[in-house]
Image: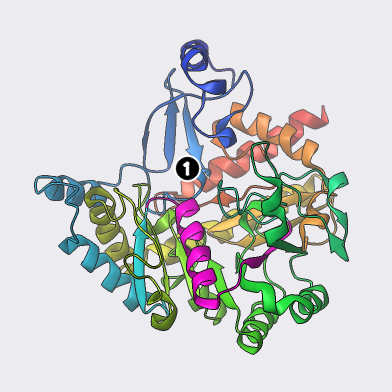
Amino acid sequence: MKKSTEQTRAAFKRASKVMPFGVSSNFRYWGEDTPVISRAKGAYVYDVDENRYIDYRLAFGPIILGHADERVNQRIVASIENGVLFAHTHLLEIDVAERMVRMCPGLDMVRFANSGTEATMHALRVARAYTNREKYIKFEGGYHGFYDYALFSTAYTAGGSIGSRRSPIAVQNSSGIPRALGDLVYIVPYNDFEILEQTVRAKWGEIAAVLVEPIAGNMTSILPEKGWLEHIRKLCDEYGIVMIMDEVKTGFRIARGGAMEYFGVKGDLMTYAKSLANGYPLAAFGGKREIMSVIEPGRVAQGGTYCGNGVGTAAAIATLDILENTNALDVIAQRGKRLMDGIHTVLMEAEIDHALTGVPSMFSFVLGVEQAPKEYRDVINADLDLYEHIQVGMRARGIEYELDGKEPWFLCESHSENDIDETLFALRDTLKEMRK
């Protein structure tokens, strides 16, 4: 079980000299043991010492088929011979947009971006322009990107700062965010029908949008309660509010048409990123033609030099073709269900209180609870320390998943039955060692 990490540690020291904390995203920092990856293939990542890990982080979700998928890479190699940026619309963009509209119910028109952060940022601007209102509702614990408007009351907010359930505080999650932006967001507990309705009825004239993750990915993949998404849809229809479904994680992962297909509820605007291009940089937002048509040159701004870039769109064509026309998502769901069931059995054997949340392609196990959490305040009462201790033992046995117990496990098409077996054996052995 003991592995050499000498070269990986040396590489991290190099990174720390030229990059703050040695990473390009705060979510990648794990202290002195922060991994440095040399390569990845299929369901595996390898550190600089060539230690292999079965990967359930999958770059925080984008790798839906597997790392370095040859079908995707071949499509990209063929396309880059024709250039990658043109300052014009190109044929690959049109192809991807047509595929998305065909696959996703309620999606009439699309614009491209480069990240989930950009996609939700642009969607909010469009919603504000369409309604001529400035404020919006987000849900406590929800994460929608790193930009100033959305970095309030995420899953990284201290429990002691969030205020009463009936009057949650909009807590900014970083220095450098203007305090005034907190006045533009109303925070509501996830899955709370009553408080959401009270907020909308009292403030609807100010509210441009309700921004919601159909599965709350960054807080243990909490599922919507029965009727929750329908309730949001009804209130938005009644009060002329734009319902933005943040499908950055769920899009093309939990179903071919994303959460709108899976749950049968359509947003007015939707955002996409992670599984769209199997890890290549591409994101999108879109929705009803009437609302998207508010975007006009010189009147409502949206754009970016790399939006719709040739590499990302070529990757998306290959990825969406596989997801639409093969059983890849069925394979992922089968593997994920077997893994969820196995984790449940092992934790039961170890007499550890727990709950499984999410869906097989994107799930979490929550420790120290007797039932699945329904909102962020339930999550912060979970045993996150025990989760972290188990993660350390699992990683020593070659299993890679997020250190933070609020983050989900992700499955890809490349995960095999043997990978599931190895993961469950590692969990059983880790718990046995901890009991000693």
Residue topped by disc 1:
59
201 horizontally vs 269: left or right: right
Residue 139 forms part of the magenta stretch: yes
Extreme-front residue of the structure: 298
- Residue at left offset 57%, top offset 78%: 263
**Vertical comparison of 35 with 311: above or below:** above
Residues 343 and 15: in front is 15
Examine the rendering and report whether any part of residue 185 can be seen. Answer: yes
Residue 214 percent location from the top left of the image: 60, 68
Residues 87 and 42: in front is 87
| Pointer 1 local density, CA inside 10 Å: few below 14, some 14–19, many at least 20 | some
- Residue at left offset 50%, top offset 64%: 125
Q: What span is in magenta? A: 114-140
- Residue at left offset 23%, top offset 54%: 314
Residue 316 percent location from the top left of the image: 30, 58
Q: What is the quadrant of residue 399 in the picture?
A: top right
Residue 210 percent location from the top left of the image: 63, 71
Residue 295 forms part of the magenta stretch: no
- Residue at left offset 24%, top offset 62%: 93
Quadrant of image for the C terminus: top right
Residues 135 and 374: in front is 135
Q: What is the quadrant of residue 90 in the picture?
A: bottom left
